[in-house]
Amino acid sequence: MKVLLATDCSNQAYEAAKALLSLPISEPIEVTIITALAEPYVSVPEASQQWYPQLLQQERVRSEQHQDELAKLLGERFIIAEKVTRPGHPVRVILSEAESIHCDLIVMGAQGHSFLGRLLIGSVSDSVATHATCSVLIVRSPGEAGDASQSDAVSHAKRSPITDVTVGYDGSAPAREAVNEMAGLGWDEATKFELLSVAPIYDYLLGTGLTTAAIENEELVFREMQQRCEEMVDNISDSLPNATSCVVHDQRVGPAIVEQAEKTNADLIVVGDAGHSLIDDLLLGSTTKYVLRHAGCSVWISRQHRQ
């Protein structure tokens, strides 16, 4: 499995590296660490452009030192394929490198842990999650202190592994492949997986009222989704023995996934991205984007079906 760890030398980047290290999976991982430097002569005032080469060199040295620390940390368990420091816009640099090495997963930290930070996720992580053609893991640590120093982050690098995972499952091809992606990673047997389906309910206040036909149809859909969910749990029982199914009634799919993950104290939410057209690439599906921006835990956007 090829992983691209994108870092900007921030606390969130350290959290992303720690989360990667703590993944309780047996799949062999080859990590490329990448940092994008500022775009030349774009963000620097004209009067200071003569000093830009020196500033760029200073940032390069800082970046390389930071990458060396991460490589030492991750090298305990993974193969460090390469450390890349390249000038340019972060989104372009990250996506270009991901395509170049044919990576399976991009890992990066989210910016902001407050409620507002969840709504307005960092523009770089949001853009990468939207435009990447491979799976993306956006790491968010709810208990992280906003003023934690980088040295503190490194000294506390051993974090608890992921133990509870919520997987959005509606029986579609992207959802099935998202589950299969998880099943193929060799998770520790103790890891709990909850396959969550959201059965629609009617807004009777906007309709003609409560009818027997509406109730019967609603229950039929619920039972069908429950059956599909249980069948998938049976199919992956050998790979994910701690997997269970859950079906809830709700009009809103994204909020229902986030709320259920909060109820179960999930460490990770996995959702399949259904997009495969140009428009879909530009705009993540509403459910996926809602989960990405509102979840209080890390989010894995699976694009296994698009590989």
Image (cartoon, helix red, strand yellow):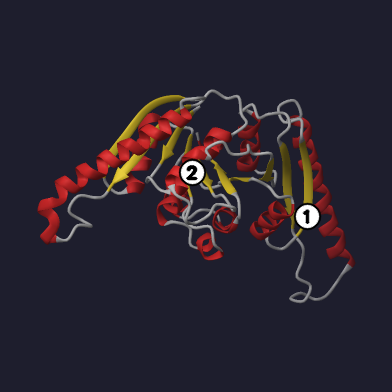
Determine the image quadrant of residue 176.
top right
Q: Is residue 39 above or below residue 212?
A: above
Give percent across and percent down for residue 34: 36, 37
Determine the image quadrant of residue 206.
bottom right
Mark 2 or 1: the one toward you: 2
| Circle 2 SS class | helix
Q: Is residue 107 visible?
A: no
Q: Is residue 294 above or below residue 224?
A: below
Q: Is residue 174 visible?
A: yes
Query: Viewer-proximal residue, 90 or 85?
Result: 85
Give percent across and percent down for residue 268: 63, 45
Give percent across and percent down for residue 46: 12, 60
Please give left or right for residue 21 compared with residue 269 in the image: left
Under mark 2, the amino acid is Ala
Residue ID at (32%, 34%):
84
For label 1, the residue is: 248
Residue ID at (57%, 43%):
300
Give percent across and percent down for residue 299: 57, 47
Upstream in sequence: badge 2 or badge 1: 2
Under mark 1, the amino acid is Val
For label 2, the residue is: 153
Query: Viewer-proximal residue, 71 or 99?
Result: 71
* Real-space Cα separation, disc 2 to disc 1, in angstroms: 38 Å
